[in-house]
């Protein structure tokens, strides 16, 4: 028999989990479908150890604890949770929608789309061997700060993610160098001020031109923007 719901929430990040909780408050028969094997969206998958400071009424909470609290709040209600399932199609029907995942179809009177940035994948570093370096020397998320203890770390980017990660790693890494292709940063002013006040080495306007594994680590070549000049090589310690 086809499963039938009042509401289908697509995406189990912070927005989708809270939508699930509210569906419970409204006594709706709801399902929450998430493509990752766990709830929490970007917060759980990309920065579980970050301290989040900008939630109204909560001055400081670690990202993974926020998700734990949200999941606990959701668990008050019998919302059907389907993890590791990606919604691949939605079709309008006479009285609602047919929702398709690789596991099958279900009917739903209404849909909340809470997919955030979508099924997120990083914007890869544009160097020839980025795929080979990924997971050994090259990372697109910091899911375990301890992994970087006493390492020399280079972070590329000028937005909140880059500066947040730099600040998270500075207390544990041997050194942190932040490389950005512009002299100005897009991150929140307060975050930029924290970086400037820290011992993070800021290198602008540079971009990563190449990265090659060497005997004792990784040789990273930086190119100064809009010039042919100055190519700096940074040696990093491997693990
Ligand atoms: C490094 C970093 C640090 C950040 N720090 C902060 C911070 O300090 N404070 C702050 O307010 N914000 C911060 N953000 C932004 C914050 O993480 C996002 O605004 C937030 O995650 C958005 O929540 P969401 O539920 O809308 O979407 P997401 O967290 O993107 O969750 C969407 C979910 O939908 C799922 N999904 C997508 N497509 C499908 C599909 N077809 N079927 C099923 N599931 C699907 C995804 O797998 C994902 O789990 C940060 C972001 C990053 C990357």
Image (cartoon, rainbow, N blue to C red):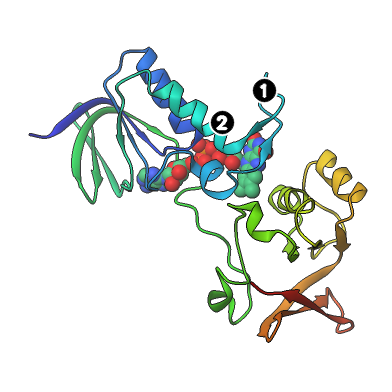
User: Residue at point 52% right, 43% down?
Assistant: 44
For the C terminus, give its image quadrant: bottom right
Residue at the spot of label 2: 66
Badge 1 crowding class, 10 Å Cα cut-off, few under 14, some 14 to 19, many 20 or more, is few
Q: Is residue 116 visible?
A: no
- Furthest-bottom residue in this view: 215
Answer yes or no: disc 2 within 8 Å of ligand 1.
no
Q: What x and y, as percent, mark residue 39?
A: 43, 39
Q: Is residue 216 above or below residue 206?
A: below
The residue to which callout 1 is attached is 58
In this rendering, position of residue 82 left or right of residue 121: left
Pick the residue in front: 92 or 82. Answer: 82
Outermost residue, top side: 26
Q: Is residue 1 left or right of residue 190?
A: left
Q: Secondary structure at mark 1?
A: loop
Determine the residue positioned at 30% across, 50% down.
88
Is residue 31 in sight in this rendering?
Answer: yes
**Image point (76%, 56%), residue name:** 158
Marked residue nearer the N-terminal end (1 or 2): 1
Residue 120 is situated, as x and y percent measured from the top left of the image, at 49, 53
Q: Is residue 219 above or below residue 148?
A: below
Q: Is residue 191 left or right of residue 7?
A: right
> CB atoms at circles 1 and 2 under 8 Å apart?
yes
Marks 1 and 2, Cα distance to the nearest angstrom? 10 Å
- Residue farthest along the right direction in this orientation: 197
């Amino acid at each position: 028999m086809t499963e039938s719901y009042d509401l289908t929430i697509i995406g189990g990040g912070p927005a989708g989990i809270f939508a699930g909780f509210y569906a419970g408050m409204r006594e709706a028969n709801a399902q929450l479908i998430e493509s990752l094997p766990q709830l929490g969206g970007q917060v759980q998958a990309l920065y579980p150890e970050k301290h989040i400071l900008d939630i109204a009424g909560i001055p400081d909470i670690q990202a993974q604890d926020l998700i734990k609290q949200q999941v606990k709040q959701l668990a008050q209600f019998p919302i059907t949770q389907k993890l590791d399932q990606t919604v691949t199609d939605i079709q309008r029907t006479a009285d609602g929608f047919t929702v398709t995942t690789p596991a099958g179809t279900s009917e739903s009177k209404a849909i909340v789309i809470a997919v955030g940035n979508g099924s997120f994948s990083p914007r890869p570093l544009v160097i020839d061997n980025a795929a080979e370096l990924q997971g050994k020397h090259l990372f697109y998320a910091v899911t375990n700060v301890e992994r970087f203890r006493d390492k020399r770390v280079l972070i590329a980017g000028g937005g909140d993610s880059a500066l947040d990660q730099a600040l998270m790693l500075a207390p544990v890494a041997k050194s942190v160098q932040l490389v950005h292709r512009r002299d100005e940063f897009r991150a929140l002013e307060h975050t930029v001020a924290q970086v400037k006040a820290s011992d993070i080495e800021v290198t602008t306007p540079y971009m990563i031109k190449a990265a090659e594994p060497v005997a004792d680590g990784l040789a990273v070549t930086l190119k100064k923007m809009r010039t042919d000049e100055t190519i700096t090589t940074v040696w990093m310690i491997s693990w």
